Image (cartoon, rainbow, N blue to C red):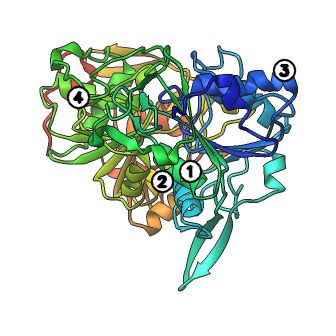
């Protein structure tokens, strides 16, 4: 008997006050049509109401995949616990979910993605919760905001601090979902799910287990239904005994604005020549300097932003394949993609489920991480998770807290001020128009990365900008390299919101970084 039903029928399976877990990563792997059906049912019937939704990684974006925004209606949602949220530029309208959070209409939390996946595993095994040192002294710590994104959440804490064998831990009690909305490419009539056109496996298996083991309902959105016994054993990533209902969207996108690219799912391999190089710009200068931190044979994590361009730098320098890139959605190796396809890689060596990738990250098994910063303060703290009255300009922490907790080395990249204009070339860079906003501030609004914990853990931390390179020391942040054409006092020291140290052996950044031609990168 087929488990296929209509979207309208599937929406009827969700009851008032259900706890619904959704598998997605922004516009990658989002069961968008199913979320739309729930919102449409609410518009017709006024039900379901007062839902709690769990999103280990964001469901939806601001560029065409609405995701959780379909549910952001007064009365439908009561609480959202998310690793990240839809984000985008201020030129686009604020996502409805952010409006609900900022106006305190719903309870909104931001919990690191890896911890949320761990919470699903604990719920599946009927264990009490997650005890971890990931997140200590960040905004997730109850001594700070405890992951609360608004006043409603602050009044209802979901994390507490414990002492265990002389050390502090954060404890996240298990939350038991009773509905899972997951996504795959194909389902047979028994509900076996395969992912042959997906760019990541995300956490669908863990979410289905958490719901199945607690007597709930698992709904799978797929692109097509195939006959029983036509999927090979090795194709099936989620077996049919964990799936209750199948809904079919033949127009399902692989990623936002990508119908299907077989290189993303590993069916073909693109020639190296098919990847575009990064345009010469101050952003490229920063990415080039970050690339100089690499050593051959390393496994290196990449985050969204300027550092995502580093693989293209290696490609341009003839060094592609010398480093293995690992991203939180699960891709290992290949060329991580940019823009709407970020989170995927073309020509990957492997795609592992995102929860297992986070286990790798939380334990610090990789060599270094290249991440962006939005704000940095005098203690070396970094904020990427919340900023002022426009929090939707960020996505929350995502996997940032998991990744940085035990990383051996972290290289943060970004501009020294926001909105500056530059004259670039002839082996130097000059500030043509200063930025309007400081990014090196006395105290960050949100601590997504703790400088204090980095010092305690003996982590190596660099901050790479277009003007200089800095390092975190026990005495503060120290300028160790200066860009040619930049005046130390005028362009750096006077533009920080706190005193910066200057290394006794201050050196100049390589002038070749500031020329359009390949700069002769050599890996250690």
Q: Quadrant of residue 219?
A: top right
For label 4, the residue is 347
Q: How far apart, in angstroms, are the residues tagged by discs 1 and 3?
A: 35 Å
Q: Tell me the mark number nearer the camera, choosing from 1 and 3.
A: 3
Upstream in the sequence, badge 2 or badge 3? 3
- The answer to which of 17 and 372 lies nearer the viewer is 17
The circle drawn on residue 331 is none
Of the two numbered discs 4 and 2 in the rendering, the one whose residue sits closer to the viewer:
4
Judging by the rendered image, the residue that carries numbered circle 3 is 44
Circles 2 and 1: CB distance less than 8 Å? Answer: yes
Query: What residue is shown at x 47% (from left), y 18% (from top)?
Result: 253
Residue wearing tag 1:
112
Q: CA distance from mark 4 to mark 3?
A: 45 Å
Dot 1: element: loop
Question: How many angstroms separate mark 2 from mark 3 (CA)?
Answer: 41 Å
Residue 104 location, x and y as percent?
85, 39
Of residue 300 and residue 18, the one placed in the foreground of this image is 18
Q: Residue furthest bottom?
A: 165
- Residue receiving disc 2: 402
């Amino acid at each position: 008997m087929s488990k296929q039903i209509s979207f309208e029928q599937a929406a009827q399976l969700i009851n008032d006050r259900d706890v619904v877990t959704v598998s997605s990563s922004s516009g990658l792997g989002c069961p968008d049509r199913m979320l739309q059906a729930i919102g449409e049912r609410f518009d017709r019937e006024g039900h379901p109401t007062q839902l709690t939704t769990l999103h280990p990684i964001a469901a939806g974006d601001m560029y065409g995949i609405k995701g959780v925004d379909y549910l952001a209606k007064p009365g439908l949602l009561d609480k959202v616990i998310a690793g990240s949220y839809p984000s985008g530029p201020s030129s686009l309208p604020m996502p409805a979910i952010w409006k609900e959070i900022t106006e305190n209409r719903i309870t909104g939390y931001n919990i690191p993605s890896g911890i949320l996946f761990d919470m699903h595993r604990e719920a599946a095994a009927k264990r009490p919760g997650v005890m971890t040192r990931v997140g200590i002294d960040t905004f997730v710590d109850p001594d700070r905001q405890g992951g609360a994104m608004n006043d409603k959440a602050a009044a209802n804490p979901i994390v507490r601090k414990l002492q265990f064998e002389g050390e502090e831990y954060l404890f996240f009690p298990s939350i038991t979902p009773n509905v899972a909305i997951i996504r795959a490419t194909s389902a047979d009539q028994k509900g076996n799910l395969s992912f042959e056109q997906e760019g990541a496996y995300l956490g669908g298996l863990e979410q289905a287990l958490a719901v199945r083991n607690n007597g709930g309902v698992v709904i799978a959105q797929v692109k097509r239904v195939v006959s029983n016994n036509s999927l090979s054993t090795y194709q099936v990533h989620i077996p049919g005994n964990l799936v209750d209902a199948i809904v079919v969207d033949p127009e399902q996108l692989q990623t936002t604005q990508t119908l299907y690219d077989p290189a993303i799912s590993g069916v073909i391999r693109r020639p190296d020549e098919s990847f575009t190089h990064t345009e010469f710009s101050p952003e490229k200068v920063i990415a080039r300097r970050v690339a100089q931190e690499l050593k051959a044979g390393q496994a290196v994590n990449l985050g969204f932003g300027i550092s995502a361009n580093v693989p293209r730098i290696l490609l341009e320098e003839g060094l592609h394949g010398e480093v293995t890139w690992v991203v939180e959605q699960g891709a290992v190796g290949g060329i991580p993609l940019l823009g709407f396809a970020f989170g995927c890689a073309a020509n990957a060596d492997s795609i592992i489920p995102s929860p297992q990738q986070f286990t790798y990250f939380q334990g610090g098994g990789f060599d270094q991480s290249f991440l962006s910063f939005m704000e940095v303060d005098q203690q070396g703290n970094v904020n990427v998770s919340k900023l002022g009255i426009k929090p939707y300009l960020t996505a929350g922490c995502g996997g940032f807290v998991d990744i940085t907790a035990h990383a051996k080395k972290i290289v943060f990249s970004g501009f020294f001020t926001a909105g500056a204009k530059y004259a670039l070339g002839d082996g130097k860079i000059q500030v043509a128009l200063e930025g309007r906003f400081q990014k090196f501030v006395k105290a960050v609004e949100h601590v997504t990365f703790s400088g204090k914990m980095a010092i305690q853990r003996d982590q190596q931390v660099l901050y790479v900008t277009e003007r200089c390179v800095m390092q975190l020391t026990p005495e503060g942040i120290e300028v160790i390299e200066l860009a040619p054409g930049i005046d130390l006092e005028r362009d750096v020291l006077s533009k920080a919101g706190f005193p910066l140290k200057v290394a006794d052996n201050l050196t100049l950044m390589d002038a070749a970084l500031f020329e359009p031609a390949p700069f002769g990168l050599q890996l250690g």
